[in-house]
Image (tube, helix red, strand yellow):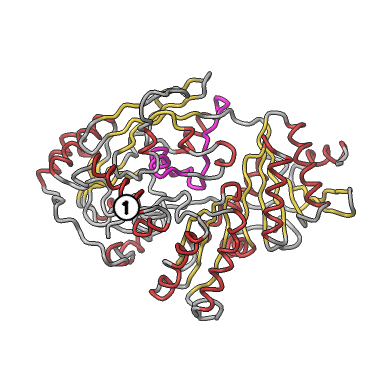
Amino acid sequence: MMSRSATGRLRALTQTTARIVATRPNVLRTVAVPILNATRLYTTTVVPSTKKVIPYTVDKFPGHVRNENFKKITEQDVDFFKSLLGETGVVYKNEDDLFAFNTDWMNKFRGKSQLALKPKTTQQVSAIMKYCNDQKIAVVPQGGNTGLVGGSVPLFDEVVLSLQNMNNIRGFDDVSGVLSADAGCVLEVLDNWLGEKGYMMPLDLGAKGSCHIGGNIATNAGGLRLLRYGSLHGTVLGLEVVLPDGTILDNMATLRKDNTGYDLKQLFIGSEGTIGVVTGVSILTPHRSKAVNVALLGLNSFEDVQKAFTHSRKELSEILSAFEFWDINALEMFKKHAVTKAAMENEYPFYVLVETSGSNKDHDDEKLNNYLEKMMENEVAQDGVVAQDETQIRSLWAIREGFTEALGKEPAVYKYDISMPVPKIYECVEDMRAHLTQGGVLGKPDSAVIDVVAYGHVGDGNLHLNIAANRHDKKTSELIEPYLFEWVAKHKGSISAEHGLGVAKNEFLGYSKSPVMINMMKTIKNLFDPNGIMNPYKYLPTK
């Protein structure tokens, strides 16, 4: 067991990260190594000079055809919206101002909308939807626009309905921990506001500084805390939703138990704005942990990653709040684009970030130290570091949260968010590397593909498979899709674990859902939105 003096020394290190080293069986020591420099994820600033070179989605991915049943915007329509929202609530035919509404943060998807609306109240959203439904004007609801599948930007000339001005906190019950808020509230703002009251949001994302809680709900965002607090299907207690015809569905319940009738709110969680606009949310928030620990381990194989996870469930149980992994390829990609210092003296094929959250620091420290000791003794982990303060915790998390930004700096990247049984996760990665090599697009200096990198949430079988490339080309795309989706389906996985379907994956839904299920979804869509104006061309197969 780790001695009390050793535990005390771990706590005393304030400017360095403690590195745990196995010197001989049953003996651990700590040495100091430099901490990492934190990075910031999701830089959404658009360089003006790049505006003209981002192709439209319909040109980049041909095959989409505008539905001519949808009305094209007229000056009379614009006058109505201005009378409702005022001049500041309407952005019309201003290419520079509309660029941010038409383009996703990765500069991968770009629409052609000439009109963005910015309501401030649910009643205004209702009036907008009623008018658009009557006039058959297509609408794309938009939150923080941090999605990865093109679900929050238009394809053609759909009106963008931005919730950015609906950002008020409506109420909070500090007994039950239930928060009520507008859909346009930024996730990080809510989390910081709750932090002052000793609570926290039950989900955490790399994009928390930009994403909206309404968008999180519309996409059923998972994130880094799902292992501990579960999905939004469990933590969301009530929703306020404006239906396509303008009807306000007020279901802002704050009850944890309500067994009366169909649980309608569940239909809108993960519906990606296709059957209604989420305008308000009641969500159950947990107490903010008094004691948080973060450790980073270096391992030799994915089999060891699985062993470490299995042991973490047993040894850390109720205090385990996150278990993330990445491979050496992901780390090299991060180091390529970030100013950082090594957390460990040596590099390893795999890394695991373990976070614990509890209420008693002594208790949590002892459990974590016992766990780490066993990992080292049994040679599951080869090396490890433990953060000693909040700055070091952020530094270790910065690695995991920095992969998306680093990959975004490559010339091109194919991003896939998939889930499958945990033992199959790295088989998928290795198979894709072999497949692309055999296909002639990986492995040579002039290859189209630079590397295949992997990271994700081991606790829920979620793999973020990223293929960095020198360019997007037809050969590479056809090698990846539908091969990857066929592989996932064969191993009983899902083609979208947490990012949704949008315009990137809707045509591949059949790899995860049966024809009967898809037909049922289309029936629901037609019931709520018979005119098909809500976020068209996405989510469900169109072919």
Q: Is residue 96 visible?
A: no
Q: Secondary structure at mark 1?
A: loop
Q: Which residues are magenta?
A: 195-221
Amino acid type indicated by mark 1 = Leu
Q: Relative to 409, does residue 28 appear above or below in the rendering?
A: above
Q: Residue 339, image x and y in percent? A: 61, 59
Which quarter of the figure has residue 443?
A: bottom right
327 left or right of 530 in image: right
Residue bearing the label numbered 1: 540
- Residue 203: within the magenta? yes
- Residue 497: within the magenta? no
Q: Quadrant of the N terminus?
A: top right
241 left or right of 513 in image: left
Seen from the viewer's position, the closer of residues 234 and 444 is: 234
Which quarter of the figure has residue 129?
A: top left
Residue at (74%, 57%) from the top-left corner?
Answer: 344
Q: Residue 256, image x and y in percent? A: 47, 24
Among all residues in the image, which is located at the extreme front?
516
Residue at (68%, 42%) from the top-left corner?
Answer: 313
Q: Residue 512, image x and y in percent? A: 43, 54
Residue at (45%, 36%) from the top-left corner?
Answer: 233
Q: Is residue 227 visible?
A: yes
Seen from the viewer's position, the closer of residues 155 and 528 is: 528
Seen from the viewer's position, the closer of residues 336 and 433 is: 433
Magenta stretch, main secondary structure class: loop
